[in-house]
Amino acid sequence: MTIVIPYNLRLNYLNITLATLKEAIRNYQCKIILYNTNEDDRTCLAIFNEFADIEIRTDFKKTKDCGRLFIDTLLPSIINDVFSRSSDSHILLLDSDTVVHPDAIKIFYSMLGIVDLGIGTTFNTNTHQFTTVLDDTFGIKRIVGGFGLLISRDAWDKYGKNITSNWDVEFSTKISKSIDYKVYCTFKSYLE
């Protein structure tokens, strides 16, 4: 599984994200890629000296001309770029200000065994209600936000590859309406 973290200016938060992520992946082989979306800032990379195994990308092809907009606008381009350079069946997309619970990656790895997983998340918010309760751990939602998402390559290729705006809502809505995939979420949140 490849873990992707887009960032621009929130380096203090990103340092916390990387520290908590490092603890959570201690028993797993995960590739971590940071996408620097602030093209003007090439000098802030010293913060990553203690995370030498992290790849930092600034050279990704934008799906459309996004101008100088927010990271959310760039996320479809970033997801397309990761899948074009990786053979992984899933990527985990984290925000640059995420606090990762020590068991979060373990839960995400357990989701990899779900055959019809289009999107999986361990961040439960009351904003998006469950449509189905599966067991004590997981349920199904119609929509999830773009925070802490495990994204299936096959589902992205089929339903998300050409999305350019409101990507998280549009992608999760397409997934939940499909007969191929579902949107899974844990009841307990493992990300903050």
Image (cartoon, rainbow, N blue to C red):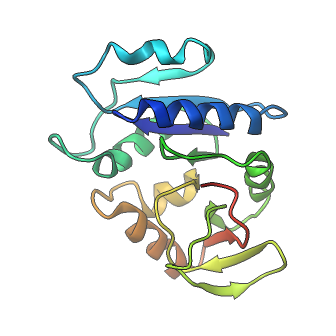
Question: Camera-side residue: 58 or 157?
Answer: 58
> Where in the figure is residue 31, as x and y percent of width and height?
64, 29
Res 186 quadrant in image: bottom right
In the depicted structure, whether residue 71 falls above or below residue 54: below
* Observer able to see residue 85: no
Farthest residue toward the bottom?
131
Q: Residue at x 83, y 79 (%)?
A: 135
In the depicted structure, whether residue 41 falls above or below residue 91: above
Question: Camera-side residue: 58 or 176?
Answer: 58
Res 2 quadrant in image: top right
> Where in the figure is residue 59, as x and y percent of width and height?
33, 24
In the depicted structure, whether residue 134 falls above or below residue 166: below
Q: Residue at x 42, y 59 (%)?
A: 160
Relative to residue 158, is residue 91 drawn left or right?
right
> Where in the figure is residue 154, as x and y percent of width and height?
57, 55
Question: Camera-side residue: 151 or 148?
Answer: 148
